[in-house]
């Protein structure tokens, strides 16, 4: 029998049972913040992280505190059993596969919140998790894994989440729990527009940071780079307009804010290439190239960045 969906007050009083699927830097940060606030959290992560967390707790080295947070960790997707809230933090390349691993273990009234790059992960996940409540979230945080069981936070941390909750814990209850845990959170009826705004930021910064292996602050100081970024953004906006997307916020101001608030941060794409891992570039600049081709919109700046990152991926593999 499905439990009664949590109200905001109930969530605050009782606490949430939370599972984090794909607990890399983003998942460890948000899962750790919720655990630190008293919620029951299990991280589903790679074995080296699980071992370190079981031994020492999760080290959270943030801009405001440096602590070891005690919480559960497992390398098995079955650890999601009983969770009311699942933070889904896998790479965009793994969305369907990870969703299939979770499907047999999800509670019927669970809410799965996608904390991923790209604009279509929630829709893709819904095709796998039919009957499960899935909501998209937009993530603005600068974090990295500094070692096994050690997440380092460089700045920001806010979330924008999609309304949900007719048969699950509500977005309002989740937002209240996150805010109480120190995570600025808002609920938006235009999450699609917010996801596209984040996609445009990623298209402007990620590939350039990856190719140069430089943080955002040094990237934007490079000769001609701001012009390249301007071309990338113009192409992205043209594709978004053709898709009928109302991009949220002031894109130009958001572009400036990234370099100002995260000057020492390397993009996730740069981190992937540095570690010899496959990146999400197909779901960033590559998505703009693909959608642009389908709509008859030229995207040469995005195509060059996408192609160069793909070339470097092949080299490092």
Image: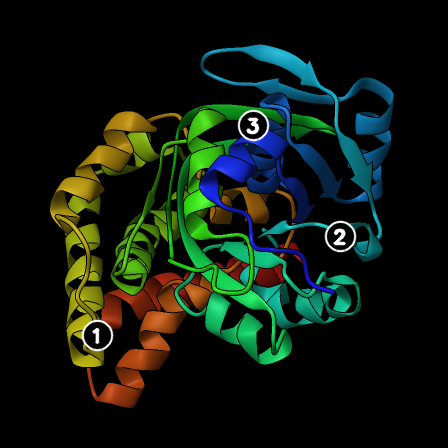
- Give the Cα separation between the discs numbered 2 and 3: 18 Å
Res 231 seen here: yes
Along the line of sight, the residue nearer the viewer: 224 or 102: 102
Question: What is the secondary structure assignment of the residue under circle 3?
Answer: helix
- Give the Cα separation between the discs numbered 1 and 2: 37 Å
Q: Identify the residue shown where x is 84% and y is 41%.
A: 47
Question: What is the secondary structure assignment of the residue under circle 1?
Answer: helix
Residue 221: give x, y in percent of width and height: 22, 32
Density class for disc 1 (Cα within 10 Å; few <14, some 14-19, many ≥20) is: many
Q: Are marks 2 and 3 in contact (CB under 8 Å)?
A: no
- Give the Cα separation between the discs numbered 3 and 1: 36 Å
Density class for disc 2 (Cα within 10 Å; few <14, some 14-19, many ≥20) is: many
Along the line of sight, the residue nearer the viewer: 267 or 315: 267
In the displayed structure, 53 sits above or below 238; it is above
Q: Are marks 1 and 2 in contact (CB under 8 Å)?
A: no
Q: Identify the residue shown where x is 42% and y is 68%.
A: 307
Residue at image mark 3: 33
Res 281 label: none
Q: Identify the residue shown where x is 43% and y is 70%.
A: 120
In the displayed structure, 217 sits above or below 289; it is above
Residue at image mark 1: 239
In the displayed structure, 4 sits above or below 145; it is below
Give the quarter of the image for residue 234. Answer: bottom left
């Amino acid at each position: 029998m499905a439990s009664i969906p949590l109200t905001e007050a109930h969530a605050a009083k009782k606490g949430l049972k939370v599972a984090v699927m794909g607990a890399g830097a983003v998942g460890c940060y948000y899962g750790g913040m919720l655990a630190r606030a008293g919620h029951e959290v299990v991280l589903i992560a790679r074995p080296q992280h699980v071992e370190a967390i079981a031994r020492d707790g999760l080290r959270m080295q943030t801009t405001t505190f440096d602590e070891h947070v005690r919480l559960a960790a497992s390398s098995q997707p079955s650890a999601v059993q009983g969770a009311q809230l699942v933070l889904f933090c896998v790479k965009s390349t793994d969305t369907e596969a990870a969703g299939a691993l979770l499907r047999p273990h999800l509670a019927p009234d669970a809410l799965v919140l996608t904390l991923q790059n790209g604009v279509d992960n929630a829709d893709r996940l819904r095709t796998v998790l039919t009957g499960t409540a899935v909501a998209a979230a937009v993530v603005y945080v600068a974090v990295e894994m500094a070692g096994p069981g050690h997440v380092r936070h460089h700045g920001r941390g806010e979330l924008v989440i999609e309304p949900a909750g007719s048969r699950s814990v509500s977005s309002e209850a989740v937002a209240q729990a996150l805010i109480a845990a120190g995570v600025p959170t808002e609920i938006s009826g235009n999450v699609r527009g917010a996801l596209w705004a984040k996609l445009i930021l990623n298209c402007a910064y990620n590939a350039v940071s990856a190719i140069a292996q430089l943080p955002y602050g040094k990237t934007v100081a490079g000769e001609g780079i701001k012009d390249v970024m301007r071309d990338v953004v113009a192409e992205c906006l043209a594709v978004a307009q053709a898709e009928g997307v109302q991009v949220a916020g002031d894109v130009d101001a958001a572009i400036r804010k990234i370099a100002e608030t995260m000057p020492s941060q390397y993009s996730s794409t740069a981190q992937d290439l540095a570690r010899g891992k496959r990146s999400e570039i197909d779901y960033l600049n590559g998505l703009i190239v693909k959608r642009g081709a389908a709509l008859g919109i030229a995207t040469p700046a995005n195509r060059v960045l996408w192609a160069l990152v793909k070339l470097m991926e092949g080299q490092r593999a």
